[in-house]
Amino acid sequence: MTYLPAETRYDNMQYRRTGRSGLKLPPVSLGLWYNFGGVDVFENGRAILHRAFDLGITHFDLANNYGPPYGSAEENFGRIFAKDFKPYRDQLIISSKAGYDMWPGPYGEWGSRKYLVASCDQSLKRMGLDYVDIFYHHRPDPDTPLEETMGALDFIVRSGRALYVGISTYSPEQTRQAAQILRQLGTPCLIHQPRYNMFDRWIEDGLLDVLTEEGIGCIGFSPLAQGILTNKYLQDVPDDSRAARYENQLHWGDKVTQDRLAKVRRLNELAQARGQTMAQFAIAWTLRLPAMTSSLIGASKIRHVEEAVAALDNLAFSDEETAVIEGILAE
């Protein structure tokens, strides 16, 4: 069956400018970190992407090693793109990244020009694209000169492989240095992708100030702390949850602890008073700051996308609400 996007997809979404650039992103973007790999149900991922675009989500975020196995999320996205989204390529913002391990040997990770250009080429081939809209360096490389890594990003743009470049998980000082190098090269840094949620607020300690000063956008990943900031774990750990599948050893040190769940229960009471689910409350909270361009969600079900977009109906937090939230998180 031919996919036809909803004609109303742009009616309600209020897009946000990315830093001082001309590019706008939806306040909620869809990441394919999990749930779109070779181990997942292809048609489920396809349906999620359809629904996301129908709701005005124009930005799909990938990376070379998303899956599992590595590369399979890009391969599956490429299949879906060819089947359903190719006529709408100019209405989409598709991103990929390189920085973590991808293939064996000394050229399969980190930040060398060799690795980044080769990885970008591989990603384009897997997705069946002529270019990506945004290409990121996925993590800082302590052993490669920043000039080489940023020079590779500049080359990737100038060679037509990407329209914009970004960085991910760079510290405030690293971000400032990267932005200065890219500016001198003539390819400004468009966006930074850090982790940001109620339990991980490191970007508030200097990074957001740097991004504002440099005119760089910000898209925060893991706004729900991999499902902890939802209603999912308020009773028991569901058998089909990420915490159950990975025996509570989630990425970035996330764990479902009783201390965290006690805070989530109290936060959930505030969410209910606002007419929101806990997930909607957590997403809205990440978007409360002017420097935030977008909140990057994951989804294993269509309703997760619908729930996230509905969070945009109430993004304002009163001073009283903010004080109560800060009090709960500080305990």
Image (cartoon, helix red, strand yellow):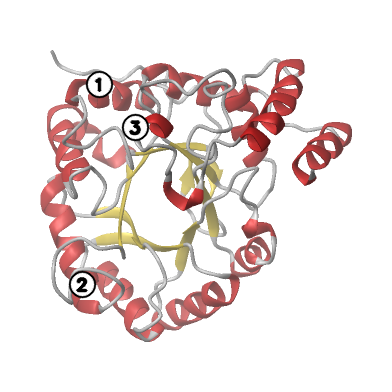
Q: Residue at x 50, y 32 (%)?
A: 227
Which mark is first along the chain, 1 or 3? Answer: 1
Q: Secondary structure at mark 2?
A: helix
Q: Foreground: 316 or 271?
A: 271
Left or right, residue 323 beside residue 176: right
Query: Which one is in front, 222 or 114?
Result: 222
Q: Earlier in the sequence, mark 3 or mark 2?
A: 2
> How far from the left and from the top, in percent, is residue 224?
54, 36
Tell me if 242 is positioned left or right of 41 in this view.
right
Q: CA distance from mark 3 to mark 1?
A: 18 Å
Q: Which residue is mark 1?
A: 44
Q: Position of residue 183 (x, y in %)?
A: 47, 78
Residue type pointed to by label 2: Tyr
Q: Visible in this render: residue 12? A: no
Residue bearing the label numbered 2: 115
Name which residue type carries label 3.
Arg
User: Comparing marks 3 and 1, which lies closer to the viewer?
Assistant: 3
Query: Which quadrant holds residue 312?
Result: top right
**Badge 3 is on which residue?**
245
